[in-house]
Image (cartoon, rainbow, N blue to C red):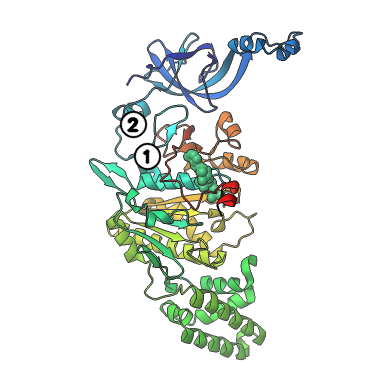
Amino acid sequence: MELTKNPPIGIVLQKGDGNSVRGILSQDAEVNMGQLLVIQDNERISLGRIESFEYINNFFSEDSELIRPLTESSEIYDLLSSSTVTRANLFIIRRYSHNSTPKPGSLIRTLPEIRDEDLPEFYGIPGLCGYIKYGRLAGSSIPLLLDLNSITMHAGIFGETGSGKSYNMRYLLYNLSNIKIGEKEDALPIILIDANGDYSDFTYTNSDMLRGRKWIKRYVLRDPLLPNDQRLTIDLSLFSPRDLAEFITSLKYGQTGGNALQSNFLEYVLSLHDQKEFNFLLGTTTGLENLKQEVNGVSSNKELGFNYSTSRSVQSALEIFKNKVVNKLSLVSPNASLTENTLELMWRSRGLATIDFSADASPGIDVTTKQLIVSYVSRITYNYLTRTKYSGSQRFIIFIIEEAQNYIPSNDYPVNANLTKDVLVTLATQGRKFGLSLILVSQRPAFIDKYVLSMLNTFFFHRIYHEDVRYVMSASGGLPESLSHALTSLETGYVIVNGLMSSMKSPVLVRIPWDSRLGSYAGSVERVERVLTTD
Ligand SMILES: Nc1ncnc2c1ncn2[C@@H]1O[C@H](COP(=O)(O)OP(=O)(O)OP(=O)(O)O)[C@@H](O)[C@H]1O
């Protein structure tokens, strides 16, 4: 591997502490905060990350009389710019077979092109197998390698609206669907909670891009229109009476947390039944009528302490459930369309299942029902992976959840997620052993439960809101100052990658190359003037 191919752009002037050096870079060198540069101290090669830089000029001195006349004379601009250099502080993040810090006089160069066969040496890893290429290290053409064997340690993709999260996720999905193992293209099975229909094209027009997959489905909550669409139905017998009672009452009361009295009442009635009966009782008109009568009967038994007015309210909650979930969405079925058998099929054919919650695919769905579905998917996935693991067959599934704050909210986020929180905490804490990778995507990491955030071990940070910086810093175990300052102003298309999956083992700035086939129509916004003039 020849890391010193590119011409020098600067020189080390001062040695800082054991891990940092200060250098001067030529004025033509275009550099970014967080960019990596090669430092050559004779035979000893190191990689340094730009921690800070400033422009300095021979003419510049804050108290100089010359400053004002200089800015007023246009002829002098060339002279000024020709005597400008960049002073940069570099943090050493990698040393190649030595332990020293580059001495003054060491040359600084940009990263050269590196052939694929040299990437293992560049990253200090045994080989390329088990890694996927991801973006390009900023200011270079070198791909970052992501270690697939750390994917079950969970990951987070965070960034404000329009910062490029969905494109990044689509790019990752593409890479996870074309994993090179020897001469073969393989894929890891993925279940994706698609908040806005950003991935639907992968299930029909662009499915050929996902070469490693032989099974692709989009689950919808309306009549299927396209060949790979399937109506989503779920099996309620997986839920406890408590879960269902809370779900049904909070459907009536919205996200205010339901009503404890009614919830207890309904839980009591449901617990008189075997869980296997729940699909009939809650999924059919006859079952729901029977249940309402039972509720009525229970209220007439004074010893049980449930009064008539609570009984009326429970019956009205059941009516709302019937209209919203059974009649409109047809969500309940004993022969659910997504089950452990589907997961086995997905494993065998390296499937992709997107659950599309966009208004087009799931018209009228509310947050509480989305939570029921996410909770259901979490349960079948956990059951499937534990069962297969204990029977001696390791499987892997990636579970991606967009708008994760709706399912695993922090205490300050106004969403009640009793249905999803516990099961997702279990997935985060236990999933790794059974081959589950949780990938949480959110605009607002500060609104995700701190405990679950602390279980994520790889982070992709796009531009984030100021309010999230502190939160992100503590969750990710800290970023260097250079990168933490850049967090709120990152350009779309740039992402800071930090954590176990990154073979750089130190936070790096990565550019995600644009490919129009990966740009989603749903995620893009047309120019106002163009739409106005063409419509
Ligand atoms: N890597 C990239 N290179 C160039 N442009 C990009 C890149 N990623 C995203 N964009 C541009 O930014 C726009 C917004 O990206 P994207 O939809 O991924 O953002 P987002 O963070 O998911 O937003 P939201 O949270 O609102 O869904 C895209 O339509 C595209 O035009």
Residue 403, how many percent across, how many down?
A: 54, 54
Q: Is residue 400 left or right of residue 64?
A: left
> What's under tag 2, amino acid-wise?
Ile
Residue 330, how many percent across, how many down?
A: 46, 75
Residue 278 at least partly seen:
yes
**Residue tagged by mark 2?**
125
Label 2 crowding class (10 Å Cα cut-off): few <14, some 14-19, many 20+? some
Between 439 and 87, the one nearer to me in the picture: 87
Q: Is residue 193 left or right of residue 81?
A: left
Residue at x 58%, y 23% (from the top left corner):
52
Does label 1 point to a residue whose CB lies under 8 Å from ligand 1? no
* Circles 1, 2 touching at the beta carbon (< 8 Å): yes
Residue 284, how many percent across, how many down?
A: 46, 82
Q: Quadrant of the N terminus?
A: top left
Q: Quadrant of the C terminus?
A: bottom right
- Count every numbered label the image shows and give the total: 2
Question: Which structural element holds mark 1?
Answer: strand
Residue at x 36%, y 46% (from the top left corner):
176
Between 191 and 447, the one nearer to me in the picture: 191
Sequence-wise first label, 1 or 2: 2
**Residue tagged by mark 1?**
147
Residue at x 50%, y 78% (from the top left corner):
327
Residue 286, how many percent across, how many down?
A: 47, 87
Q: Is residue 140 left or right of residue 125?
A: right
Residue at x 65%, y 13% (from the top left corner):
77
